[in-house]
Image (cartoon, rainbow, N blue to C red):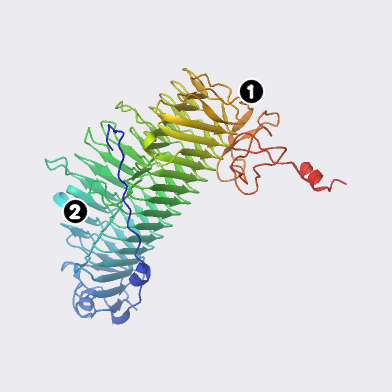
Amino acid sequence: MNRTCPRARVRALRPRRLVAGLALALAAPLAAAATVTNCDDAGPGSLRDAIAHATTGETIDFAGLACNAIVLDGGALAVAVAELTVQGPGSSALSISGNDTSRVFEQPAAGARLALRGLTLTHGRAGGDGGCVLAGGDLTLGDVVATGCAAGNATTALVSGGAVAVTGNAMLDGGAFDGNRVDGTQRVRGGAIAVGNLLTATGTSFTNNVAWSHADGNPNDDIAEGGAIFALGDTHLTDSVISGNTVKSDASEVFGGGVAIGSHPDDAMASLDVLRGHVHGNTATTQCGVCAPQGGGIAAVGDTRLRDSTVLDNTVYSPGHYGGGGGVRAFHATSLEVTGSIIAGNHAPSAGGGIMGPEQGVVTLDTTLVTGNSSGNEAGLDEGGGGILCLGCAVVLQSSTVSDNNAGASGGGIFIHYGEYAPQATTIIDSTISGNTSGQEGGGIMLDGGDANFHNSTIAFNTAASRGAGISAGEYTYQIGLESTIVANNATAGAASDVWAFPDTVGGSHNLVPSADGPADMPADTITADPLLLPLADNGGATPTHALDPASPAIDAGSNALGLVFDQRGEGYAREAGAGADIGAWEQQPTSADVIFTDGFDG
């Protein structure tokens, strides 16, 4: 992250796409070849002997094996054939140890295919890439546990893959990576796994892994990427857990405490798709006082999509208080899409406590909760965005809530910075921005450049040390539109508790805004009464909302210019349930008596 951001356009690149048929290719069944009958390191009946005599396309199994642990004294199990499957009895039934002296498996040939299933791999050690497994081609792992593997050391240059290093594609099905590490100098990648091309993981856990770049006297080179996962190709993570991992550097930048996809220093782009994932408690940290670590949970260089996922309690740290994207940091992408997810409890020293969006891209949140995230401002960079920070990008918020986030600078909930370079207007629809706090202006949302439109939304109970505790818009902001939106009950020691805007006028109609004493004129029909909002609560639907007291002046006083079918809560909660739409994100629904009367069944 540049600590000074010129108002210049950033070139967007197109990410690579997933190669069709990869999953079928990697999972293709192979013919049986040999059975391992003992746990000896070598000799007849051993795994080493079976591998040495295998032919391409064969499978080695362990049927009837009475022992449960193989310890390698003779070095790594070297696979010479181009295609081999090792079918173990199950990860809980057999472990293979590198004895802290060697890798467990290595198949370095480019274009080769190796499949390992039903095994625990442990105590592998390598001076270079891949502490337990080195694959020069494609690798499939099914029900494989990799634990206690290590690659490199404090003086090894350019090392990747604490447990597994794959030059080609990797497919993971089940299994776990726990307590692995990669150490080195210059570029260090993937505490658990490093993949040179495409990565697919389903039902896999990545916990307590470390990628650490040590100082070597040239701090510009000592970059670390991916505390658990690093991949240069398109990545799909489904039903997977990434928790308690760390990426760190003694002297330079770091990216992705849990996951790093693509490479920001190299401008290498790839896409990331996370479905039902859990990215929790990861850390991106550097000891460099002037460096800016990025992405406590995820750092992705390319289009990124999170669905039905949680990104919780991830952290970015530097002694100089620089760094951004406590939960998620996206670079050089056209889109970051978050649907049905929770982004909560993440922290960044200066920028984007929950999410830091891609330059000249769009951050889209649908039925998502962004809550309890924070960004500091000890370094005085004024970057802000406790929940979300966009540098030259736009935010689209649909049926979502941004609540209880805190920024040391501006934009307690959301900060749109350099918005004039965004590809489209920031748009807030059927959403709630509540209880956020800013050390400067824009407690709910700060707009610095570009256009912004608010439809059928509620912005309330935010605080700012300066002006515009609900909405604050700076001099580069072209236009603000408010339609059927509540901006109320916000508090500031400065001017305009609810709305402060430099544009000459605020467009729209059917709004409720009690305090807007900035330079802009509000629409003539704006209601200035207390909306009588009830506390933020679970009122149904995926995200919390502010219900209206039955006596609220907002009831039936709004509009529905976009033709919305439902209020923020979604299906089952009509957008127009009375004589007219209510102002704000929440619509009062008819009581049982009202429904009976309307349907003509009242007797």
Residue 138 position within the rendered picture, expressed as x and y whole percent measured from the top left: 27, 67
Q: Is residue 587 above or below residue 339?
A: above
Residue 601 in the image: above or below residue 477: below
**Residue occupying the far right of the picture:** 603
How far apart are the alpha carbons under marks 1 and 2? 63 Å
The quarter of the rendered structure image containing the N terminus is top left
Label annotation for residue 350: none
Instruction: Find residue 440 and report its image quarter.
Output: top left
Q: Quadrant of residue 125?
A: bottom left
What type is the residue that disc 1 sits on? Ala
* Neighbour tally class for label 1: few under 14, some 14-19, many 20 plus, Cα within 10 Å: some
User: Residue 529's mark?
Assistant: 1
Residue at image point 49% right, 31% down: 480
Label 2: state its secondary structure. Answer: strand
Local crowd at mark 2 within 10 Å, few (<14), some, or many (≥20)? many
Taking depth in this image into account, of 463 and 563 the one nearest to the observer is 563
Read off the residue under disc 2.
159
Asked which quadrant contains residue 146, the reply is: bottom left
Name which residue type carries label 2: Val
Q: Is residue 412 visible?
A: yes
Question: In the rendering, at what x and y percent does residue 466 appear?
Answer: 43, 20
